[in-house]
Image (tube, rainbow, N blue to C red):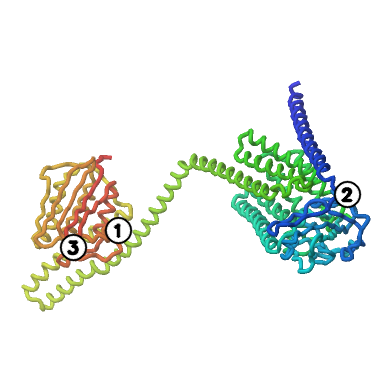
Amino acid sequence: MFNKLPIQSKLLDIKRKFISCLFILRILSLFFICLSLFYCKKNNSLESQFYFSNKNEILSLHGNWKITTNPDYNPIINEPQNDFLIGYVPRMWFNSGIKDKYLVSYNTEINFSNEILNNKFGVLVFNAINSNETYINGKLIGKKGIVSKDKFNIQNNAIPSLYPIPEGFLHKGKNQITIRLADNAASGGFLEAPRICEITVCEKSFNRFLLITGGTGFFMLFIGFYHLFLFLGNRKDNAFLYFGSGTIFHALVFFGYERIIYFFSEIFLIHFYVMNLSYCFGCIFVVLFIHSFVEVKINLISKFLLFCFALSIISTIFGGISVDYRSIHSRQVQVINIMILVPILSLQVIYLSIKAYKEKKVGSNLILFGFVLFIFTNLLTPLHILHIIPTKAFTLESSLILIICFTFALSRRTKQTSNKLLNLEKKYRSELEKEVFDKTKTLELYNKELKNINNMRDKLFSIIAHDLRNPLFALEEVISLFQDKHLKPEDLQKNIISLSQNLENNRFLLENLLKWSYVQLGYSTMKLEKVEIRKLVIESIQLHKSSFEKKKIIIKVLPKNTFYYYADEEIVRLILRNLISNAIKFTNKKGNIKISYGVKNYFAYISIKDNGIGIPTKKLKVFFENLRMEKNRKGTENETGSGIGLTLCKEFAERMNGKILIKSREKKGSEFTLLWKENES
């Protein structure tokens, strides 16, 4: 029992759909019955005449024409014919009761008022289905293709044309216009009525037709190719592929319907294949698109439609090969497509759109609106053919609206998909971002460290080659002179003082180099313990006593109290020694140096401030970055140095989880501050 319930529910669902389809078909049947009754009442007149009285108007010759299917009728002789029937224009032959004919002549009369007869006129033939000849009062004014009573000699060409009426062809009163149509598919006729107007008005109308029609077609092509390119960037969403392809085929059908293809090629088979194959492929892509968009598997009805349109494609191919079969294809296969398959396709699209709308799928409302409007305007097309409304029922506008609605629907769905992906990205970003950030930071540190090591290596070689070697050469030279007794005792005393200072500098440099080597090789370990800062400051000052006394520099240490901080004693000692040495080096004679220390905002600090020559603003911004690469600055008394000291200070401060802050103004002095977190761990 429980297994039967799903089957019963499916049968009920199919029954409801079938009843809905029957209801819609009944409404459509009533609609066309009413049109037919209206048409019968409207067209009970056998008159075939038109009146032209305003030179600024475009007279559309839609209405009753006299028609003969006699292939021997000669419009030049224009002898009265007993076999003339009354037919309506625009209309195709098989809708007018004309079957198995390949040449039909249309004749009507136009009365021109005397006031406008002096103007030049022209005839616009936009949508004759195939080859045509236009005559005014039995005189040929223009033709397209080859019109022949032998169907095998007919050369189809229905390019939209403007035929100027030469002077002297028109006369007062009644004028006869005859248009002969030939079609080797035996399904010719007019899709739009011919028009007559003053020549300048005709030219403007013709140019406007080409501009609007061509612009619309190329706009559709642009939208189609644009979505194909979007598909190349997102190949997982087939809706872009189906919509882009369907829009391109829709544009080709539009070009074929308006006979624009003949501008590119006058070969009929190209026009035939492009228009008919594009129509079938366009319908196939509509089926595929709607299922892809609403994310529903192709059901039985859609499979049936795909199969039927595939058969239509095969029929079109055979229609291009065989002239006899082409008439069957045009009169029967195309009618089945338009009257049966396309309505089923329309109902299927509307059903799936409504279902998607109920499921609140983004963009389904736009597709529903666009397709309902498109179907409604196409249902109004018979009103134009039956002369109930004078112009085409906005099929061009509805096509554009449909394409725009589909475009916006895809855009909204893409935006929704992008938002979903963005939310997923935000969800997993926190985990991935940390991992990527850590790895990137590690790589950057490795690269930076490698670059720094290379720079320091070059610097080290430079120091060893110059700063360490020169004092040793000087010492060797003094000893050599002393041994050869070329130096007097007083000169020796002076040289010994200078050599002593150089050797002290070398010792200081060697200590820095050794410390740097220990750090680079990983031998130096940090040892945090309570350190008496004032004691380290005083000891560091004493190491430079000779230097600052020689320059008569006053050094003040504040405060005088003793404080203990957790720090690495050797690191603090090395940093103090280098910073004090630097301050003395760049302070003028009789200058001042102030050393202070304490705790501020839970950070321990030691500050060395001088009133020396300072650092230029440009160099201050990238001080530590360029320190290793730049040539060392000389002091106020031309003191030299290796330049490695401040680099060591920065690296050792960072090893102690601290940093060195610099404040400086050129010619005003500098302040270097060692800052670290007071922490015993």
Relative to 406, 261 lies left or right? right
Q: Is residue 379 above or below residue 664?
A: above
**Of the two numbered discs 3 and 1 in the rendering, the one whose residue sits closer to the viewer:** 1
Q: CA gap, disc 3 to disc 1?
A: 27 Å
Relative to 603, 398 lies left or right? right
Residue visible at 75% across and 51% down in the picture = 279
Q: Is residue 291 above or below residue 206?
A: above
Secondary structure at numbered mark 3: helix
Is any part of residue 262 visible from this angle? no
Q: Label 3: how many residues lie within 10 Å, few (<14), some (14-19) or many (20+)?
A: some
Residue at which label 2 appears: 97
Is any part of residue 296 visible from this angle? yes
Residue at which label 1 appears: 622
Asked whether 245 or 490 is in front, the reply is: 245
Q: Residue extending furthest front?
A: 114
**Of the two numbered discs 3 and 2 in the rendering, the one whose residue sits closer to the viewer:** 2
Relative to 676, 385 lies left or right? right
Percent of width and height locating residue 249? 71, 53
Residue visible at 70% across and 64% down in the picture = 199
Q: Residue extending furthest top?
A: 1
Q: Earlier in the sequence, mark 3 or mark 2?
A: 2
Residue at which label 3 appears: 505
Asked whether 338 or 382 is in front, the reply is: 382
Percent of width and height locating residue 224? 65, 53
- Identified by mark 1, the residue type is Val
Asked whether 225 or 10 is in front, the reply is: 225
Asked whether 128 or 411 is in front, the reply is: 128
Q: Earlier in the sequence, mark 3 or mark 1?
A: 3
